[in-house]
Image (cartoon, rainbow, N blue to C red):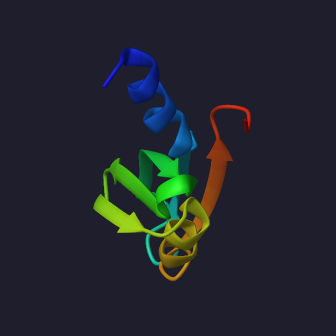
Amino acid sequence: MTKDDLLDQVMAAEPRMFALYGAFRREPAITFVGWGVQLAGLDKAYLWGSTGTHIAHSAEQIAEAHRTFGDTELVWLDQPR
């Protein structure tokens, strides 16, 4: 396998970086922040942060889970390809 073949595999995953941040509804003074990568071509998203490690099918799905306990913002850190 060549480096070009490997690069093709990397790009096929469609990686995008994102961040989630917010505050807990019950304790607004307590905040959370996390950074992640969405691999749309693999139907996976990973988030690492102050609330732990989370895995889902998309960044939006992780954000929705966080919205059950806090006021959550999702921000994309790069441009879509």
The residue drawn where x is 66% and y is 46% is 75
Of 18 and 4, the residue lying toward us: 4
- Locate residue 79 relative to residue 17 in the image: left or right: right
Q: Position of residue 80 (x, y in %)?
A: 73, 39
In the displayed image of the protein, which residue is found farthest to the front? 1
Residue 37: x and y, percent?
A: 47, 45
Residue farthest along the top direction in this orientation? 3
Quadrant in the picture for residue 35 = top left
Q: Nearer the viewer, residue 25 or 64?
A: 64
Q: At 57% from the left edge and 55% from the top edge, which residue is drawn?
A: 40
Question: How many numbered marks does the figure carry?
Answer: 0
Above or below 13: residue 57: below
Residue 18 shows in the view: no
Q: Quadrant of the N terminus?
A: top left
| Picture residue at 42% right of the left edge, 54% below the top | 32
The percent coordinates of residue 28 (x first, y second) are 51, 64
Residue sitting nearer the eye, 22 or 41: 41
Farthest left residue in view: 52
Q: Is residue 46 above or below residue 1?
A: below
Instruction: Determine if residue 77 is in view.
Output: yes
Give the residue displayed 33% in from the left and 49% down from the top. Answer: 49
